């Protein structure tokens, strides 16, 4: 397969061109206008950020994309699907409220917000893909109803996938509640009784009543657990871990297959911003300090090449002092070239997602980085 073009620009700005204008130029140079938007519905897949999180993309960037779509005759809307876990985006009403509180109102972004899988996360389209792991993907109906798909991604660390890039935004983010459960269901976490202090953080975060505390120690009922991994992230003692290492690889392969289901058969364009690179997903109701300095903005028609370029650029950056990455490198890594995202979450790996995406024909990990 030939190399894919990935376009890159830094966050350096001048008096003649601010960052929003620079994003518009990046999109134009990457070929955005080659898409026929005239009278077409364009879904802009984004993460609105959990309430309390401040690492999500500023709505100003979404405005640039929406305005550009309208300039080309299209009908844009911002979208994301509801979450599995207890939080501020578990149904469409709470999700919309969180989006508006975080600045994603129609007056700020220039377009409306539509929650992709409806009020209770059950409004879904069944997309046959006959994949190795997924036979029929369950995608938010509004996302599949769109004529054109644009992913606008905050590139960051992730506590299960290693990093959250375009594929994570597309695959997991576009899945309905049932779709998210299908992607998560192969891995079930367990609690180390010696490390558990019985604080109850896992009980509060679980939407399925899987953790129980008995005798001052937590345990997880695997019959109820859907394997979403939220309890892993909130445990203050790191007492919870996935039982099987290969479950991470299976999760990543399912994300790749769901991404294919979302993208196939229609024009797609992908944008990733590497800024405020938090160690965890924007689904958290908090965000730790970034693990690396801001890098830049990237765009491509190929989401696989885009993710590969983003992770390569991130791995070239120095860790930020006192970040989770910096602390883990000092404690665990003697190799100066250790992978930043694996070191941020040593139980994760991200390469299986990209490798499987290449295998199923979603894109290529071979790219030419074109700096503008």
Image (cartoon, rainbow, N blue to C red):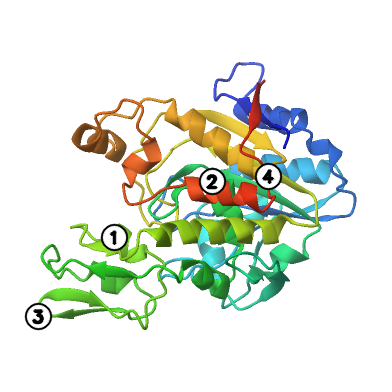
Query: Between disc 1 and disc 3, whose residue precedes?
Result: 3
Determine contact: label 1, label 2, CB under 8 Å: no
Tag 1 residue: 234
Query: Where does the image place residue 257, in percent across and percent down from the top left?
Result: 62, 59
Circle nearer the viewer, 1 or 4: 4
Mark 2: few, some, or many residues within 10 Å (few <14, many ≥20)? many
Residue 32 place in picture, x, y as percent: 78, 37
Task: Kindly identify which residue carries mark 3.
Answer: 215
Q: Quadrant of the N terminus?
A: top right
| Distance from Cα at disc 4 to Cα at disc 2 | 14 Å
Residue matched to label 2? 165
**Secondary structure found at label 4:** loop
Residue at figure coordinates x 13%, y 62% from the top left: 195
> Can you identify the residue that label 4 sits on?
363
Q: How many marks?
A: 4
Mark 3 or 4: the one toward you = 4
Percent of width and height locating residue 240 = 25, 63
Using the numbered discs, state the Cα–Cα distance from disc 1 to disc 2 in whole angstroms. 22 Å
Give the residue at x 50% y 36%. Answer: 311
């Amino acid at each position: 397969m030939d190399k894919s073009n990935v376009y890159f620009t830094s966050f350096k700005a001048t008096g003649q061109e601010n960052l929003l204008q620079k994003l518009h130029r990046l999109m134009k140079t990457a070929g955005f206008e080659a898409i026929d938007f005239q009278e077409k519905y364009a879904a802009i897949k984004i993460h609105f950020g959990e309430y309390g999180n401040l690492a999500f993309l500023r709505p100003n960037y979404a405005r640039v994309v929406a305005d550009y779509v309208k300039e080309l005759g299209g009908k844009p809307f911002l979208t994301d699907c509801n979450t599995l876990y207890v939080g501020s985006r578990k149904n469409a009403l709470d999700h919309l409220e969180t989006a508006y509180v975080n600045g994603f109102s129609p007056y700020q972004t220039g377009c409306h917000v539509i929650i992709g899988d409806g009020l209770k996360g059950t409004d879904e389209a069944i997309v046959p893909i006959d994949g190795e792991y997924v036979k029929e993907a369950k995608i938010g109906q509004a996302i599949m109803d769109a004529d054109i798909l644009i992913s606008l991604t905050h590139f960051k660390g992730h506590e299960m996938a290693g990093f959250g890039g375009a594929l994570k935004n597309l695959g997991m983010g576009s899945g309905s509640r049932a779709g998210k459960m299908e992607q998560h269901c192969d891995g079930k976490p367990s609690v180390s009784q010696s490390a558990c202090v019985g604080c109850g953080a896992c009980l509060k975060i679980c939407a399925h009543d899987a953790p129980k505390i008995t005798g001052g120690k937590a345990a997880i009922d695997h019959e109820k657990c859907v394997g979403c991994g939220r309890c892993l992230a909130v445990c203050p003692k790191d007492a919870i871990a996935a039982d099987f290492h290969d479950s991470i690889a299976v999760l990543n392969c399912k994300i790749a297959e769901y991404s294919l289901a979302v993208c196939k058969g229609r024009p797609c364009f992908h944008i990733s911003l590497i800024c405020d690179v938090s160690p965890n997903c924007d689904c958290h109701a908090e965000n730790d300090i970034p693990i690396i300095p801001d890098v830049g903005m990237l765009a491509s028609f190929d989401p696989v090449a885009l993710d590969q370029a983003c992770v390569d650029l991130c791995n070239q950056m120095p860790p930020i002092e006192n970040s989770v990455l910096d602390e883990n490198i000092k404690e665990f890594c003697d190799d100066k070239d250790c992978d930043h995202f694996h070191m941020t979450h040593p139980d994760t790996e991200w390469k299986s997602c990209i490798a499987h995406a290449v295998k199923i024909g979603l894109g290529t990990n071979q790219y030419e980085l074109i700096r503008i």
